[in-house]
Image: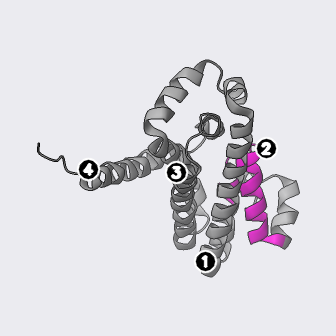
């Protein structure tokens, strides 16, 4: 497990808890304490060790991460813009402008991108700027489902090498995934746009 850069204190928890450990780490990482790559590493590790349980492990990572994001969103919503500006710093104005115009796709893309994407800052911005909770929830749910089930599938199929591959090509894979999702989103917007009524 050392090659996955998993802290020793997590190894014992993982050995006894499995899916529960994925849920807890996903929740903590998305809400209180940043644990970069740990959720991904744990998901890949467990799915590679036991491919049959891949859907369960991916689901636990997804649910933990989504609930953690929702908690941070509601905390930021109560704290309003002071919390947002504290975390965003000089990026606050740009993030605010972009979220107000493209909230759903921004959360969706940010949730798919690997570190060092400042996803927590965007989540805090969504809460502070009162992005509709339903839109936020579904954007995070879609992003985390694609991320963790995608990792789980690669781990179940290719074993532990999947982590090394994703670590080496994380930006490239992230851009491909984002490109596909963004294209589908644009197409959906085009085809679902209400036709203009002639006067």
Q: Is residue 63 above or below residue 82?
A: below
Residue 135: mark: 3
Residue in view at x 55 percent, y 66 percent: 149
Query: Residue 34 at x, y = what percent?
Result: 74, 43
Horizontally, residue 73 falls left or right of residue 101, namely right
Q: Is residue 113 magenta?
A: no
Q: Badge 2: few (under 14), some or many (20 or more) residues near its Cα, within 10 Å?
A: few
Tell me what residue is drawn at x 36 percent, y 51 percent. Answer: 185
Please name which of the two marks, 1 or 3, marks the residue nearer to the observer: 3
Question: Which label sits on residue 190?
Answer: 4
Residue at the (79%, 64%) spot, across then down: 21
Distance, label 3 to label 4, CA atoms, is 18 Å
Looking at the rendered image, the quarter that the C terminus falls into is top left
The mark lying in front, picked from 4 and 1, is 4
Q: Which residue occupies the foreground of this view, 2 or 83?
A: 83
Report how many numbered discs are placed on residues in the image. 4
Cα distance between the residues tagged 3 and 2 = 24 Å
Question: How far across and down, in percent of the image, does residue 90 sit?
Answer: 61, 18
In the rendered image, which residue does mark 2 sit on?
33
Mark found first going from the N terminus, 2 or 4: 2
Instruction: Give the magenta part as a residue range.
Output: 17-41
Q: Does label 2 or label 1 sit earlier along the sequence?
A: 2
Q: Earlier in the sequence, mark 4 or mark 1?
A: 1
Alpha carbon distance from label 2 to label 4 = 39 Å
The kind of secondary structure the magenta stretch mainly shows is helix
Q: Which residue is mark 1?
A: 51
């Amino acid at each position: 497990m050392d090659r996955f850069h998993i802290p020793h204190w997590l190894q014992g928890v993982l050995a006894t808890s499995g899916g529960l450990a994925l849920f807890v780490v996903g929740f903590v990482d998305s809400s209180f304490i940043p644990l970069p790559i740990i959720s991904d590493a744990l998901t890949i590790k467990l799915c590679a060790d036991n491919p049959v349980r891949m859907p369960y492990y991916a689901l636990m990572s997804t649910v933990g991460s989504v609930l953690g994001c929702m908690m941070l969103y509601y905390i930021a919503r109560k704290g309003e813009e002071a919390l947002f500006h504290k975390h965003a710093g000089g990026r606050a104005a740009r993030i605010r402008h972009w979220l107000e115009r493209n909230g759903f796709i921004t959360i969706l893309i940010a949730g798919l991108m690997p570190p060092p994407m400042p996803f927590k800052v965007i989540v805090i911005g969504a809460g502070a700027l009162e992005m509709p909770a339903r839109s936020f929830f579904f954007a995070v749910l879609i992003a985390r489902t694609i991320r963790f089930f995608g990792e789980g599938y690669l781990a179940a199929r290719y074993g532990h090498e999947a982590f090394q591959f994703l670590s080496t090509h994380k930006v490239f894979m992230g851009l491909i995934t984002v490109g596909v999702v963004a294209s589908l989103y644009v197409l959906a917007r085009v085809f679902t746009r209400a036709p203009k009524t002639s006067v």
